[in-house]
Amino acid sequence: MNTLTINGYQAVISFDPDIQLFRGEFIGLNGGADFYAADVQGLKTEGEVSLRVFLEACKRRGLEPRKHYSGKFSLRVDPATHQAAAIAAAAQGQSLNQWATQTIRQAALAL
């Protein structure tokens, strides 16, 4: 996954083959803010414009621009994966929740 940080906000970058442009989409916002460009410098420039417009709209409406995360989410896996995760957690002397939190954090920070 390709990401780009613009003014402290993360955007996921992908390529849209239909229009032959790169697309950036800010993540973790309370609304949509995306942008397109042909190269990295263009992505940075267009991303700054898109983010500024989004933040100004939030300010006018009195909205918090960032999503709030509760720290809770439900995860469904197949029984074999559940068993393997429970064994891995026990082997490390952790609860399944502790093990999953640590594993997810390590994977997310590796991006």
Image: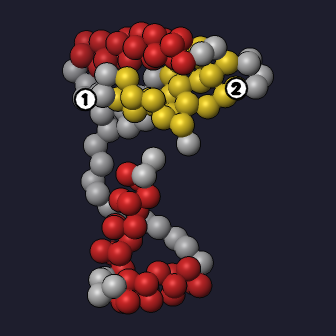
Residue 28 drawn above or below residue 42: below
The residue identified by callout 2 is: 16
Identified at 38% across, 51% down, the residue is 109
Work out whether residue 61 or residue 104 is closer to the camera in this orientation and state it. Answer: 104
The answer to which image quadrant residue 62 occupies is: top left
Amino acid on which disc 1 is placed: Glu
Screen quadrant of the N terminus? top right
Sooner in the amino-acid sequence: mark 1 or mark 2: 2
Work out whether residue 85 or residue 56 is closer to the camera in this orientation and state it. Answer: 85
Image coordinates of residue 105 in percent, x first then y, are 35, 59
Image coordinates of residue 97 in percent, x first then y, are 33, 75
Alpha carbon of mark 1 to alpha carbon of mark 2: how far?
30 Å
Q: Which numbered marker is on residue 64?
A: 1
Can residue 57 be seen at all in this image of the molecule?
A: no
Question: Which type of secondary structure does the marked residue at label 2 adopt?
Answer: strand
Identified at 54% across, 18% down, the residue is 40
10 Å neighbourhood of mark 2: few (<14), some, or many (≥20)? Answer: few
Image coordinates of residue 32 in percent, x first then y, are 46, 26
Image coordinates of residue 26 in percent, x first then y, are 44, 29
Question: Which type of secondary structure does the marked residue at label 1 adopt?
Answer: loop
The answer to which image quadrant residue 53 occupies is: top left
Can residue 94 be seen at all in this image of the molecule?
A: yes
Amino acid on which disc 2 is placed: Asp
Q: Which numbered marker is on residue 101?
A: none
The answer to which image quadrant residue 64 occupies is: top left
Identified at 59% across, 78% down, the residue is 78
Identified at 74% across, 17% down, the residue is 19
